[in-house]
Amino acid sequence: MALNLVMLGPPGAGKGTQAERFASEHGIPKVSTGDILREAVHDTTPLGEKVKAVMERGELVGDDLMIGIVRERLTRPDALGGFVLDGFPRTAAQATALDEITASRGPVICIEIQVPDEELVRRVRGRRVCDDCGANADAFEHLPGALPPLCQNTDRCRSVGPKWVARSDDSELVVRERLKVYWRDTRPMIEYYSARPTFRAIDGKQPPEQVREALVAAVASALGKPASQLRSLAKNVGLQA
Ligand code: AP5
């Protein structure tokens, strides 16, 4: 059985933070559509040029483009045994396409992280990312209230003295637009999942470590397994992939 996980929730809910950690702890790839698009914008690829303005307005990129990107990424060998999806699906058409892409891959666990809107705006406005590679400053250990002295995303980052900046879509105006789009286009889609036995909602207002524990417990409960077996499940999957 593969460990297929979809993280759902509004902007700033903590999907990326939790997806990163869960994926690395369980040996499966994190597939973030936001990261894929931001990398394309940063590298000024044809995809990046197509989506830059849409992202800066806080709107959604077209379904056909997004479904093509995710279909290609999930059929790479490293994702066949499991994945953590962050930022997809966001519309009913994307959800239907994901069902089709994963039809023969075992259950898809869907976790909604719930956080009140005002807390989301506060978090997103406070977020700082590395100007070079886009890594979130909070991903690294640092003193409360201070930014880390160096970006530690050594795989991708060429920064020698990081410039911590706000993400281009994190201004209050754009965050409120992203939330509007979320409640209009994405939240209704979550209803599509909520009746399934593999759906769980967790409280994302808690500190990150407690959200992590709630996430692991929710995934284990959706699979009907003890949390202690998840890691070995992912390892077995990795061997088969
Ligand atoms: P995307 O990158 O997916 O943005 P998003 O969904 O708006 O989510 P965020 O990255 O803002 O938040 P998150 O939930 O991941 O929270 P995070 O962990 O970072 O998409 C960006 C754009 O790309 C879209 O607007 C759209 O244009 C386009 N796009 C992407 N996918 C698309 C698709 N499928 N279809 C169409 N268009 C698409 O945390 C946020 C902050 O809070 C961080 O600073 C973090 O350190 C902090 N934090 C995290 N957890 C906690 C906690 N428990 N307590 C306190 N602080 C916390």
Image (cartoon, rainbow, N blue to C red):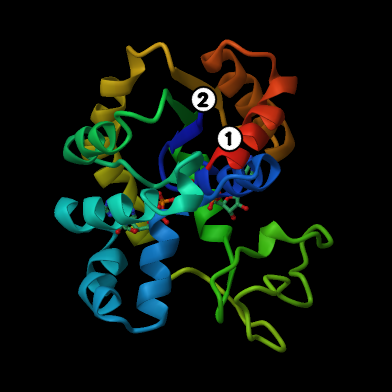
Q: Residue at x 33, y 34 (%)?
A: 102
In the image, farthest residue toward the bottom:
160
Q: Residue at x 66, y 46 (%)?
A: 21
Dot 1, crowdedness within 10 Å: few (<14), some or many (≥20)?
some
Which mark sits nearer the N-terminus, 1 or 2? 2
Corner quadrant of residue 54:
bottom left
Which residue type carries mark 1? Val
| Direction from residue 199 to residue 218 in the image, left or right | right
| Direction from residue 34 to residue 237 in the image, left or right | right
Which residue type carries mark 2? Met
Q: Whole-Å distance between the Cαs marked 1 and 2?
A: 7 Å
x then y, percent, for residue 13: 50, 41
Q: Nearer the viewer, residue 141 or 157?
A: 157
Can residue 114 be seen here? The reply is no
Q: Secondary structure at mark 1?
A: helix
Dot 2, crowdedness within 10 Å: few (<14), some or many (≥20)?
some
Q: Is residue 115 above or below residue 226?
A: below
Can residue 166 be seen here? The reply is yes
Residue tagged 2: 1
Q: Residue at x 21, y 38 (%)?
A: 97
Q: Nearer the viewer, residue 143 or 199?
A: 199
Residue 237, disc: 1
Q: Secondary structure at mark 2?
A: loop
